[in-house]
Amino acid sequence: MAQPTTSSRQNTVRQAIPDRNRQNTPRSGRDGSSSTGPRAKQTSINWGAALDRWFTDQRSTLTLGVLFMLVAIGLFVSFVSYIISGQADQSVVDAAFSQPVTESGADTRNWVGLVGAFVAHVFVFRWFGVGALALPIIMFLAGYKLTLGRELLPLKRTTVGLLFLAIWSSLVLGYVVLVTKSAETSSVWCGGIGYEFNETLFSLFGWGNLAFIGFVLFLFIVYFFDVRSIKLPQFSPSSLTDSIRRERSHRPDETLQSYEDSEQKEDSNADFYEEKQPSQPVVDQFTTEEPTTASNPVSEPEVTTDIPVRQEEPASESIAKSSGVTLTIKNRESVSDTSPEEEDDLSQTSTSAFEPDPFEDDSLVATHGLYDSTLDLPNYQYPTTDLLTEYQNNRKAQVSEDELTANKERIENTLRNFGIEIDSIQASIGPTVTLYEIVPAKGVRISKIKSLEDDIALSLSALGIRIIAPMPGMGTIGIEVPNKNREMVSMRSVITSDGFVNSKFDLPVVLGKTISNEIYVADLAKMPHLLMAGATGQGKSVGLNVLLTSLIYKKHPSQLKLVLVDPKKVELTLFNKLERHFLATLPDSEEPIITDTKKVVNTLNSLCIEMDNRYNLLKDAGCRNLKEYNAKFTKRRLNPEKGHRYLPYIVLIIDELADLMMTAGKEVEQPIARLAQLARAIGIHLVVATQRPSVNVITGLIKANFPARLSFKVTSKIDSRTILDTGGAEQLVGMGDMLLSSNSEIIRLQCPFVDTNEIEELCEFVGNQRGYDEAYSLPEFVGDEGGQGEEKDVDLGNRDPMFDEAARLIVIHQQGSTSLIQRKLKLGYNRAGRLIDQLEAAKIVGPFEGSKARDVLVQDLQMLEETLKRLKGN
Ligand SMILES: Nc1ncnc2c1ncn2[C@@H]1O[C@H](COP(=O)(O)OP(=O)(O)OP(=O)(O)O)[C@@H](O)[C@H]1O
């Protein structure tokens, strides 16, 4: 779980993360520590940084996006206008530089004036002809992405495709214009490039240039669509029979008979036969993510069975299949009385019965590449290390030779006074304490040394002596003596350490420095939960900040979500700024950081629902844990239509459990225990801190499920036992001095120090970048008070405009799920939530039932239409 590494190579480490440092080089000059170059150089670097900041600032991308879209619309209009009336403008454009602008402007017929005419003249007439229209389309798509943060169409692929189309259409049209000798009137269609190119080629190859143009198209298709072989369609009757047989082998047994019949008919009469459409098993697989119920009209066998289908359909299907082309077959006649949604699903059904599932092979990866969650926020920049302060003067613990020898002698003398002889004594200086390792003489009983703890402390006149007898795996006895001048371990020094930078852990958290000055990095995902305790003022809040800082430095917002619970209301406030990047909240919650006890209970229960949902997704995907699941999703083997999505890790941080246990007791204890027991496989990890490690706070149930525990100094041995199952934490010296117990091993660590202003800078750096539209939404959970009260608030006289549509959707799918409405109607969570409340008030769906979808109380569309009519009548 842990990965201790030496911290002595910080320079190399800084080089190991060049990108981040380079991008923000000027920030390193903030404290004047590292920017020492000449002034001129500094100025140029600052420009770069300013530009960088400008681009990562949400306001700039928004402005740029809207500007792109406006320019794109302007260009589109001017190009179209030029294509229609461009000839008249050609002389205006030519004369534009020789006569006053007002005159040229008045003469131009372009809808976007003289500028429009001029730009269109260059792009349409001189260059691409109608193909130039690709440019505003690409620009609009880019603007859309910058403005709304998502893609209307895959931008890269569409750009490549459209650019090719612009050039290729110019070539083809150039050919047509050339052979029809209509350059005088029609060269606006092909543009200068197409015409000149064809003219040159024509003089070289004559008619052969058509072959060249055709070959260019072929090349494009091969590489763009990744075509690797050509399968020609075979129309022979035997191939037809073969493919019918092939299809038949994929169908359920009960339908075989009808196929036999149809085949016989086909033998006797090649033009016409009937078939039955088997649908049930396929529908289940292809309609929606949620399990469909028997009354679901989409999956109802009646809809698709026993429908006479003309022979051309299976025949064309067979041909399509044998030619490697997949065709969607819809029998419009047979489904003409169904709604558009049904048609949509039915078309999927009839297609999918024959198509290979693209989620079962690598075809999607071949066309789209691996799924990359970080493209959610493609411009996101990881925080740079210079946001953290460098404490230059506090590098090493200062333990003088004199102090060392004096301590050694005192230890030896004390032991000798009690009749204990030692063979050797050796010291290693840690950041907070120095460890004296003793090899006792033969025959000395270890328990005897251990019982002398207080006497040794007295003789050394030092607090916080800890005796480790024996040192695990060393064959020695350790005596830890606090240093007079301790070293402060800065966050910056650990974040830039090799061990952290190169860590491949899923959730790397740097916990501190060991006694041998190694940086201790642990994987929270393997811990898998952490319990923290410590008396007030001993460094707990700093510890939580360190943990959060490590995670934020290492993870992309698409990979990690934090649920922050802070009953003290002041400790985690700074992380507010990360709301649209890293925080997860309940829908409709006003505060991104949860401070209210009632909300804490709801959040914990909501996390339990998220856990159950995630388990269902894992089960459906046949994966054992989150890593496998995400790997499968990345390889595009999981169908998002079935509810699959990339699952970020969720880390729940509770600062001050004691407070919650006092006010809500079992209500918080149970979901915490449940999450701690089950959530590790699905990527939900808990970090729970408390000031009071008493048994009524850290109950047996909680303790049993937190194998990793961390203790800062506590006030009594009893507290130390409660948290670590052994004494020792009461002997710590405070200020981040701590003991970590994991895998039945106890390690003393010095927690790094991170100040509030460092956290502030970090959160500002992340928070000022473009984020998601809102915090990551946890599943809805309404506590006892909430549920019934809200029902009364719904005003059915003031229904959402999408109400009817949502109602039909719910009834067709027989599934009262908010996420279904969200997905199919492309609505935000809040609006979908309001719709479901209205549907509940209208008695179309039943009440909220935790993690299960609500019951649908209306059986079919006919009943629904009556209900809707009634509602309208009121
Ligand atoms: N790792 C550390 N290195 C150096 N000093 C530290 C460290 N951790 C804490 N301190 C010092 O101890 C003080 C108190 O720390 P912190 O606020 O984290 O305590 P706490 O345990 O959270 O207290 P409370 O429970 O009252 O909030 C800090 O202001 C700081 O001066």
Image (cartoon, rainbow, N blue to C red):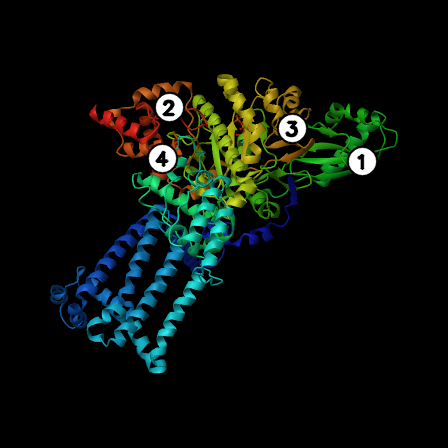
Helix, strand or loop status at disc 4: helix
- Distance between mark 1 and mark 2 Cα atoms: 68 Å
- Sequence-wise, the earlier of marks 2 and 4 is 4
Q: In which quarter of the image is residue 448?
A: top right
- Sequence-wise, the earlier of marks 4 and 1 is 1
Q: Are marks 4 and 1 in contact (CB under 8 Å)?
A: no
Query: What residue is shown with label 3?
Result: 732
Query: What residue is shown with label 1?
Result: 475
The front one of 856 and 169 is: 856
- Sequence-wise, the earlier of marks 3 and 1 is 1
Query: What residue is shown with label 4?
Result: 821
The amino acid sitting under disc 3 is Leu
Mark 1 lies within 8 Å of ligand 1 (Cβ measured): no
The front one of 628 and 763 is: 628
Q: Quadrant of residue 105?
A: bottom left
- Distance between mark 2 and mark 3 Cα atoms: 57 Å
- Sequence-wise, the earlier of marks 2 and 3 is 3
- Distance between mark 2 and mark 4 Cα atoms: 15 Å
For residue 246, side relative to residue 9 (left or right): left
The front one of 313 and 781 is: 313
The amino acid sitting under disc 1 is Gly
Q: Do the residues labelled 3 and 1 touch (CB within 8 Å)?
A: no
Label 4: few (<14), some or many (≥20) within 10 Å? Answer: many
